[in-house]
């Protein structure tokens, strides 16, 4: 897709958000999900890596805007590693908000700030293998330990990922409730984590902290709906915003596509948006 053609929001709000970003880039925050947005979705999340064009595009754009942040459910350090973000010239002020904002990595220090393990997550981590075994959910499912702040169960490798996902939703919700946790559904994944943090909370807090003048948020999955909602709410308070859907697969939630001001074909399209913004600001 041509650089000049991709920056064409379909809504008045999106056009206003883009215009504000281009007019005052020094006050603009560009916020991005990781999996499915900067990195292609793969069967094994441990093999996910940023699109080859992502880091060069981010390094081009970052010096021209107030800040670039990555907002992800992954541990911050994992996103940094899988993204290849550390030590990149031009990304000196990149921020990664991991575990939905519970962790924070700043490029200038190279350090991750994180709270200790949540007791509910510790308990669920111990109980989950036996719980899945008792309900007959082992074949094809697997557990991802997210470092003391969350545990996720994936169904992508099962014979019928959709059926397995729906079959697990009820039992895992009960397990989460028993330990004071919540369920965050995603693309063939159910994540058990503490309540009170989501991508919307993390994004809104960062935008207020930095006194942003505009925001672009790009995401691809159910977990990004909270960030979309936060941008919509902030628009009502007068902060211009542009919502981008990374629509690289038929699995992209319809609600996300409906709310997006601009839809692009997966991480490759997101890279094109980043480069188009850098071109426009040259």
Image (cartoon, rainbow, N blue to C red):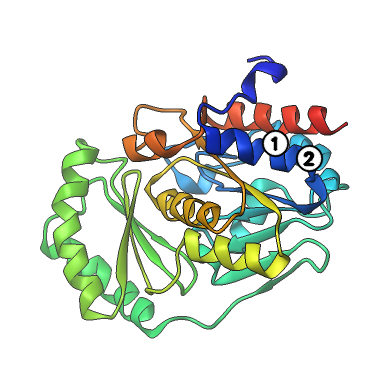
**Which class describes the residues within 10 Å of circle 1: few (<14), some (14-19), or many (20+)?**
some
**Looking at the picture, how far across and down is residue 67, in whole percent?**
75, 54
Q: Is residue 217 left or right of residue 157?
A: right
Nearer the observer, 230 or 202: 230
* Image quadrant where one finds the C terminus: top right
The residue where tag 2 is placed is 23
Q: Is residue 45 left or right of residue 31?
A: left
The residue where tag 1 is placed is 19
Q: Distance between the Cα atoms at labels 1 and 2?
A: 6 Å
Task: Establish if 132 lies above or below 217.
Answer: below
**Looking at the picture, how far across and down is residue 271, in whole percent?**
66, 31
Q: Secondary structure at mark 1?
A: helix
Nearer the observer, 245 or 7: 7
* Image quadrant where one finds the N terminus: top right
Q: Residue at x 34, y 81 (%)?
A: 120
Q: Is residue 204 left or right of residue 278?
A: left
The residue most toward the left is 135
Q: Residue at x 33, y 35 (%)?
A: 254
Q: Is residue 222 left or right of residue 242?
A: left
Q: How many marks?
A: 2
Q: Secondary structure at mark 2?
A: helix
Task: Establish if 11 lies above or below 155.
Answer: above
- Label at residue 254: none
Nearer the observer, 129 or 87: 87
């Amino acid at each position: 897709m041509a650089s000049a053609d991709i920056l064409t929001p379909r809504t008045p709000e999106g056009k206003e958000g883009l215009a504000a970003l281009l007019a005052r880039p020094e006050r603009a925050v560009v916020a991005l999900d990781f999996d499915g947005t900067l990195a292609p979705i793969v069967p094994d999340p441990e093999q996910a890596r940023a699109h080859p064009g992502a880091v060069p595009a981010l390094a081009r754009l970052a010096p021209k805007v107030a800040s670039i942040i990555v907002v992800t459910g992954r541990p911050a350090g994992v996103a940094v590693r899988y993204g290849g973000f550390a030590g990149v010239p031009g990304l000196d002020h990149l921020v990664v908000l991991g575990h939905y904002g519970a962790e924070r990595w700043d490029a200038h220090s190279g350090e991750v700030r994180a709270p200790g393990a949540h007791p509910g997550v510790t308990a669920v981590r111990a109980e989950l293998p036996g719980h899945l075994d008792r309900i007959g959910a082992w074949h094809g499912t697997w557990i991802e330990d997210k470092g003391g702040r969350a545990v996720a169960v994936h169904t992508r490798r099962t014979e019928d990922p959709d059926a397995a996902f729906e079959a697990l939703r009820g039992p895992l919700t009960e397990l989460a409730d028993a330990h004071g946790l919540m369920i965050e559904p995603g693309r063939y994944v159910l994540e058990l984590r503490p309540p009170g943090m989501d991508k919307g909370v993390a994004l809104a807090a960062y935008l207020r902290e930095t006194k942003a003048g505009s925001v672009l948020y790009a995401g691809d999955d159910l977990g990004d709906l909270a960030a979309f909602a936060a941008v919509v709410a902030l628009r009502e308070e007068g902060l211009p915003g542009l919502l981008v859907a990374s629509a690289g697969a038929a699995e992209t939630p319809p609600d996300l596509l409906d709310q997006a001001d601009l839809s692009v074909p997966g991480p490759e399209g997101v890279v094109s948006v980043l480069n188009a913004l850098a071109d426009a600001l040259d």
